[in-house]
Image (cartoon, rainbow, N blue to C red):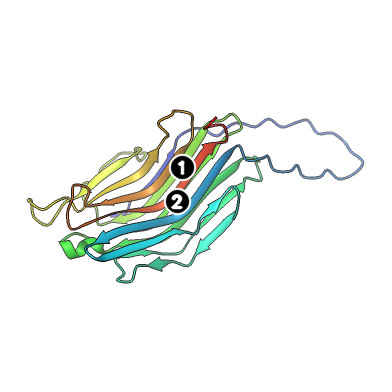
Amino acid sequence: MARRAVMTLALAATCATAPAVAVAAPAQPAPPAPATFDGAASVGTASAQFGEDAIDLGPLAPCTTDGPATASTPGVASADNSVVFGPGESKCEPNPDTGLWKVAAKGRNFRLNALKAYGGPEIRVSSFSAGCTITAQGRAQASVSVGGVSGLSGVSFIGVLPINYTVDVPGAKAEDPVLARVTLNSVVTPSSGRGGLTVSAFKVQLFPDGGPGSGTITVGQATCTPVNADS
């Protein structure tokens, strides 16, 4: 079952244009506005433990507003192919149209096969993206898209994907522990209330109530923090 949803936390700031002025020499492009926040993005991470078997992937193709500005990955998989990320890229650059900085990551062909050994499904995400920015007015904006999700049951929403939309993956038997807790459009904000956020397209917590494994897998993530958030 394919699903695609897009979420935007705030409307983009409007821009006013100055009247045209005749000049003798060609106008030079304005330099990009300085970053109004600290930002970072990555295609994903996976940290999990199953008995003596450990999985440690990522962060994949990380970028930050301090550099590198762009990064990419051809894809990577754990040794047993229980977690697979396809190709993806991240960007932490100013938008040439607005001058505002944005951090974002996107990718495709994520697969989680680790749950099959416990009677669970193979979970797939064919495409995903996550991004955020802080406007010149200090407002946080975030956007997420998730497409081609399969292996999850009980997914039901109308229109825009809600923030922190969570679905549990049950065990093969009623008495079995929950195999995973999956959150689409995960948004975490600082408890200080001073702005900023971390947005993830798709997040998996393995055996959240205890069981034969543990760990967290994040698929597409971006973090934006205003530069004065800790002041």
Q: Quadrant of residue 14?
A: top right
Indicate left or right for 102 with 209 as reference.
Answer: right
Closer to the camera, 131 or 214?
Answer: 214
Closer to the camera, 37 or 201?
Answer: 37
Please provide percent x and percent y for residue 93.
61, 49
How many residues crowd around disc 1 within 10 Å: few (fewer than 14), some, or many (20 or more)? many
196, above or below 206, in the image: above
Query: In what element is the residue under mark 2?
Result: strand
Query: In what element is the residue under mark 1?
Result: strand
Query: Where the N terminus falls, by quadrant?
Result: bottom left
**Residue labelled with disc 2:** 129
Who's the residue at 52% across and 32% down the image? 230
Marks 1,2: beta carbons within 8 A: yes
Indicate left or right for 10 with 67 as reference.
Answer: left
Residue 124 seen in render? no
Q: Amino acid at mark 1?
A: Ser
Q: Amino acid at mark 2?
A: Ser
**Residue labelled with disc 1:** 143
Q: Quadrant of residue 33?
A: top right
Q: Earlier in the sequence, mark 1 or mark 2?
A: 2
Please provide percent x and percent y for residue 131.
49, 45
- How much space separates mark 1 and mark 2, taking CA atoms? 8 Å
How many residues crowd around disc 2 within 10 Å: few (fewer than 14), some, or many (20 or more)? many
Query: Where the C terminus falls, by quadrant?
Result: top right
Please provide percent x and percent y for residue 197.
45, 38
